[in-house]
Amino acid sequence: MSSMPFRHSDSMRSLIRENHLFLMLLRRFGISLGFGDASIGEVCQKADIHADTFLAVANFLADKPWQNFEIDIPSLMEYLKNAHDYFLGFSLPTIRRKLIEALPTAGPDELAMLILKYFDDYAEEVRRHMDFENRAVFPYVEAMLKGVPGSKLNIAEFEAKHLPLAPKLQELKEIFVCHYQGSGNQDLLTSVLFDIITLEQDLASHCAVEDTLFVPAVEAIEPPEQHEHQAADSNQGLTARESEIVQCIARGLSTKEIAERLFLSTHTVTTHRRNICSKLDIHSAAGLTIYAIIHGLVDISEIKAQ
């Protein structure tokens, strides 16, 4: 796979050929199929889509350079809203229906019922997470773009509370792959497992787009007063995700290992590490380890020899 970024002049067909999961990208940007040999720029222009935003997201998801593409915040928000609609209105309900069909929930198999309850609790957690973004975060940004004051929210507070959604799906996947020995339709179980794996990857990518593209774009337009109390943060302005990465560094994990644990690309982890070093003015793993111990992010007993 080439490390060269996708550009306006590349054919949309070549983008899909490189990664068929980009079909979801088209859907969330409101781009219809049947574009023939048209370029990415031509397809976006015809669909009235901000091409640079589309390319920023596409290149980010492909782990290619994306920083030189201008992000239009309303276009990115529309993409994120459409993704929420897909997760809540289609993907999660479809997986639940398949679980009911695959697992013997009508019989005495209590384990099947526990698995279904686990999934229902997870789906409700995802719904609350996305409802907050739909009801509070996006309206706050839309009002700010219109010059309407009033909300005390700032995007750093959102980022600090923005926890990853994918790990619990990884747990459910592991339950099926390694531990579940109950009865059930094995073909349907395999099918729903594929759906769970796809959703796990999709949600991880979605949260990464919010953390790495959306949050910095909003921070760049926020008025200074929105950040006044931010400097008093107990971890010197580190976001929740940055604190997680500092914990991983202190425990001796490599960039690749951190990416795998947090469901991020190595490029995203590298970007976060650069931001962490800039914020703290600490540039070595040993220094970050000492910082993590002092601020209670890790216990000294957790530290691997480095």
Image: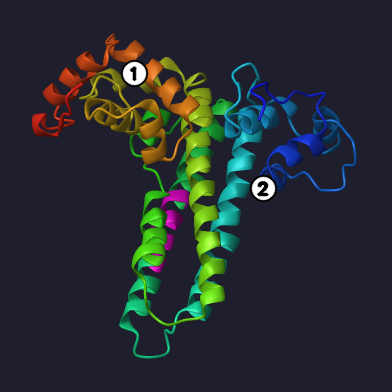
Q: Looking at this rendering, what residue extends furthest in the bottom direction? A: 107
Residue 124 is at least partly visible in this image: no
- Residue 10's place in the image compared with 172, above or below, is above
Apparent side of residue 25 relative to residue 156 in the rendered image (left or right): right
Q: 48 and 204: which one is in front?
A: 204
Q: Which mark is residue 164?
A: none
The quarter of the picture where the C terminus appears is top left
SS category of the residue bearing label 2: helix
Q: At x 23% / y 24%, what residue is drawn? A: 235
Q: Which residues are magenta?
A: 119-130
**Percent from the top left, x then y, of residue 123?**
43, 61
- 1 and 2 marks in contact (CB < 8 Å): no
What x and y, as percent, mark residue 47? 82, 39
Residue that mark 2 sits on:
24
What amino acid is found at the position of numbered circle 1 in the picture? Ile
Majority secondary structure of magenta residues: helix
Name the quadrant containing residue 251: top left
Asked whether, in this view, residue 149 is left or right of residue 247, the answer is right
Chain-order first, disc 1 or disc 2: 2
Residue type at tag 2: Met
Place of residue 85 in the rendered image (x, y in percent of width and height, measured from the top left):
59, 54
| 47 is within the stretch colored magenta | no
Residue 47 shows in the view:
yes
Colouring scheme, one of rainbow, by chain, secondary structure, one colour: rainbow
- Quarter of the image with the N terminus is top right
Left or right, 57 with reference to 263: right
Q: Which residue is mark 1?
A: 276
State which quadrant residue 67 falls in. Answer: top right
Q: Residues within 10 Å of mark 1 (few under 14, many from 20)?
A: many
> How many numbered marks does the figure carry?
2
Q: Residue at x 48, y 40 (%)?
A: 207
Q: Can you say whether 16 is above or below 245 in the image?
A: below
